[in-house]
Amino acid sequence: MTDGKGIVSQDQIASVDEVIDDPHAPAFDFAVVNDEKAGIYEAVFGEREIAGLSYNVAGDDRLVLLATSVFPEFRKQGIASELIRRVLDDVRAQGKTVTIMCPIVRTFIEHNPEYADLIDLKHPGAAEGRR
């Protein structure tokens, strides 16, 4: 979720800041749809996709969480935090682990340690989020 050079973009910083500053549920409810073909969990409000968390499947028991994005008009409303929470809850329900490449997911878990047990010990991914 960097620009290819390991640098976090301004949009990513906004989502990381949301995860740090606003851990509460969003002001409105949205559905989460797992599009396994595309490898993305989509947050859908009405008929519109408002956010997504992309992933790759690694074997039968692990997902590599790649990138979280929220459309600009829906940022700073708790969407990223709630999407990540629901994705991690789904991963837990499936008995899987995660490798984290997304700094937003990493920051979320740092601030919500009850999800730390989902990180695959052999393949943890990115070292840390943004504090």
Image (spheres, rainbow, N blue to C red):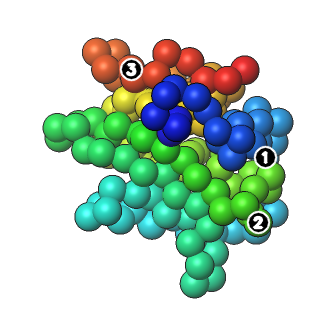
Q: Which residue is drawn at the image coordinates 56% and 18% (left, top)?
A: 128
Name the residue that disc number 3 marks. 124
Mark closest to the chain's N terminus, 3 or 1: 1
Question: Would residue 52 be seen by someone viewing this image from the given angle?
Answer: yes
Q: Residue 51 appears in which quarter of the rendering?
A: bottom right
The image shows residue 27 at horizontal and vertical percentages of 81, 63
Relative to 96, 65 lies left or right: right
Mark closest to the chain's N terminus, 2 or 1: 1
Under circle 2, the secondary element is: helix
2 or 1: mark nearer the eye: 2
Under circle 1, the secondary element is: loop
Cα distance between the residues tagged 2 and 1: 18 Å
On screen, 45 above or below 100? below
Name the residue that disc number 1 marks. 24
Give the number of the disc on residue 73: 2
Mark closest to the chain's N terminus, 2 or 3: 2
Q: Which residue is drawn at the image coordinates 80% and 52% (left, top)?
A: 76
Judge the density around disc 3: few (<14), some (14-19), many (≥20) Cα neighbours within 10 Å. Answer: some
Give the number of the disc on residue 45: none
Q: Amino acid at mark 2?
A: Glu
Cα distance between the residues tagged 3 and 1: 26 Å
The image shows residue 87 at horizontal and vertical percentages of 48, 49
